[in-house]
């Protein structure tokens, strides 16, 4: 059973912040050092200072990125930079953007979601997580006791009743938040407090299975924080206590002070839920940059890859002018129709990857037809998992020939994930990385199929586009 509740979110005070585009950011895990610096300079109240504060050379246990975030957060609350919603609300969120030259709108709802373990089968992950990333998020949650950004999840609603119920209430009213960000994406949010609409959404959502699209580390961190707080004795003074209607107050301290029908807000996590059938739901590929491989010989690597792949070599023009054409070839070979509904090119090859090794050398790697994948992939995995492009790339290339598996993969010192195709080429040319692998996108149906049977894809198998913006709503625990 999926339990959602309205929340009294914190939002930027429009009397203090004139332009929301100055204070929001993409999710922290796609922000590099240059972007972090840019957001710092843009506005002293940019959400970057809370969600992804800088690491400084003199950091110690008492003064670090997490304590500074907590101090800034308290200051912003005191200065009324952030103000709390007067009533519990579910937030209707629209993102308008361009994709493939077409204008798209994706709708979702932001609310509180009651935390459940994956074992219960009501909320399902599809990707592996990395311990050090969860440790980072847990330190921030301990310091601030707040969700600064939502978990992005999916649900099924063919009739679109959930979003429809909120749109019926919001119809004809201007959005409470409305701005366009740096990338040209428009963001609109309505604060829906109507009890009837909220109750209807809660009832419809109750029997849904939830699939985490983006934010696995945040969800698992919220679970870990909940367990940690329960073990330490429950709600403390100042914690938020909440009920199913979203009514809340600050706890005076101690479990005995929690009234019947109320529970600690840390039992919930802020979540933005999008209908799988929403026409604006788009999945893009996430490419792999490889570094720190000792004694890497790319010629030897190509010879090894030829064991299982047909390899076509191409020379990139000095200005990379033919790179888009090569990416089109990658997509064209990978996405022909197949009777089973899975990606397959017109030549019968099902799985194709791009590889850039530097010095303008680009390769298309096409899995050979006569291979028995079931014999080559992990036996404990389902056929659906074995057929994933990301599974094949990681198992038959990255793990087999580059040795990035187990503890090495968990350390996250060898693989960087990127959406930037030309940027990946440049990173290899600059010597920051040794290799760049390019993939076709995973299908939404593949995501739900894998998650539905309790399996996880390799990390960063999907890139749901566009990313949710950080800073629209904050959820205090």
Image: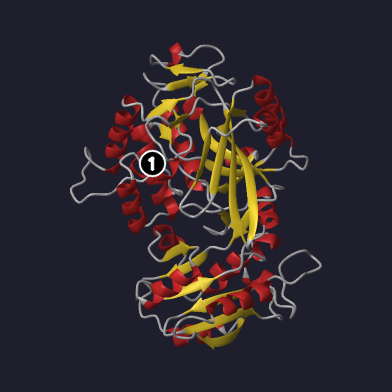
Foreground residue among 161 and 41:
41
Where residue 458 appears, as percent x and y from the top left, is 55, 59
Foreground residue among 70 and 454:
70
Q: Is residue 14 visible?
A: yes
Where residue 403 appears, as percent x and y from the top left, is 45, 71
* Quadrant including the C terminus: top left
Where residue 357 appears, as percent x and y from the top left, is 45, 80
Foreground residue among 357 and 138:
357
Give the quarter of the image for residue 203.
Answer: top right
Q: At x 53% / y 63%, what residue is drawn?
A: 286
Q: Residues within 10 Å of mark 1 (few under 14, many from 20)?
A: many
95, above or below 343, in the image: above
Q: At x 74% / y 41%, what residue is drawn?
A: 157
Q: At x 45% / y 37%, what residue is drawn?
A: 224
* Quadrant including the N terminus: top right
Give the quarter of the image for residue 396.
Answer: bottom right
Q: Is residue 281 visible?
A: no
Give the quarter of the image for residue 195.
Answer: top right
Where residue 130 appears, as percent x and y from the top left, is 45, 53
Which residue was labeled with disc 1? 47
172, above or below 420, in the image: above
């Amino acid at each position: 059973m999926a339990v959602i509740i309205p929340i009294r979110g914190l939002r930027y005070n429009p009397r203090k912040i004139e332009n929301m585009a100055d204070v929001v950011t993409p999710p922290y895990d796609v922000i590099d050092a240059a972007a972090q610096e840019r957001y710092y300079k843009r506005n002293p109240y940019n959400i970057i200072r809370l969600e992804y504060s800088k690491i400084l050379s003199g950091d110690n246990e008492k003064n670090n990125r997490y304590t500074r975030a907590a101090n800034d957060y308290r200051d912003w609350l005191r200065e009324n930079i952030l103000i709390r919603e007067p009533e519990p609300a579910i937030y209707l969120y629209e993102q308008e953007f361009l994709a493939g030259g077409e204008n798209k709108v994706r709708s979702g709802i932001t609310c509180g979601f009651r935390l459940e373990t994956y074992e219960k089968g009501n909320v399902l992950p599809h990707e592996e997580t990395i311990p050090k990333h969860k440790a980072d998020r847990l330190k921030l949650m301990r310091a601030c006791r707040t969700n600064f950004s939502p978990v992005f999840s999916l649900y099924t609603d063919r009739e679109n009743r959930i979003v429809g119920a909120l749109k019926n209430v919001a119809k004809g009213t201007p959005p409470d938040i409305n701005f366009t960000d740096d990338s040209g994406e428009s963001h609109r949010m309505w604060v829906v407090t109507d009890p009837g609409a909220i109750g209807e959404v809660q009832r419809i959502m109750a029997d849904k299975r939830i699939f985490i699209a983006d934010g696995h580390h945040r969800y698992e961190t919220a679970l870990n924080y909940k367990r940690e707080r329960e073990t330490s004795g429950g709600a403390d003074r100042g914690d938020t206590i909440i009920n199913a209607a979203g009514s809340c107050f600050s706890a005076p301290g101690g479990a005995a002070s929690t009234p019947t029908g109320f529970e600690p807000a840390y039992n919930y996590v802020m979540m933005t839920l999008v209908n799988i059938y929403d026409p604006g739901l788009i999945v893009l590929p996430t490419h792999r940059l490889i570094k720190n491989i000792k004694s890497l010989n790319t010629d030897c690597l190509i010879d090894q890859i030829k064991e299982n792949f047909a390899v076509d070599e191409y020379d990139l023009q000095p200005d990379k002018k033919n790179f888009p054409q090569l990416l089109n070839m990658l997509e064209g070979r990978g996405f022909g129709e197949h009777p089973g509904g899975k990606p397959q090119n017109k030549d019968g090859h099902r799985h194709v990857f791009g590889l850039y090794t530097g010095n303008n050398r680009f390769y298309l790697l096409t899995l050979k037809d006569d291979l028995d994948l079931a014999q080559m992939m992990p036996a404990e995995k389902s056929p659906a998992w074995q057929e994933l492009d990301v599974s094949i790339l990681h198992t038959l290339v990255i793990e087999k020939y580059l040795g990035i598996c187990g503890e090495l993969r968990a350390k996250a010192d060898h693989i960087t994930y990127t959406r930037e195709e030309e940027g990946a080429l440049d990173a290899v040319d600059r010597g920051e990385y040794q290799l760049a692998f390019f993939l076709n996108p995973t299908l939404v149906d593949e995501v739900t199929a894998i998650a539905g049977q309790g399996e996880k894809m390799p990390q960063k198998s999907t890139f749901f586009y566009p990313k949710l913006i950080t800073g629209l709503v904050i959820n205090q625990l």
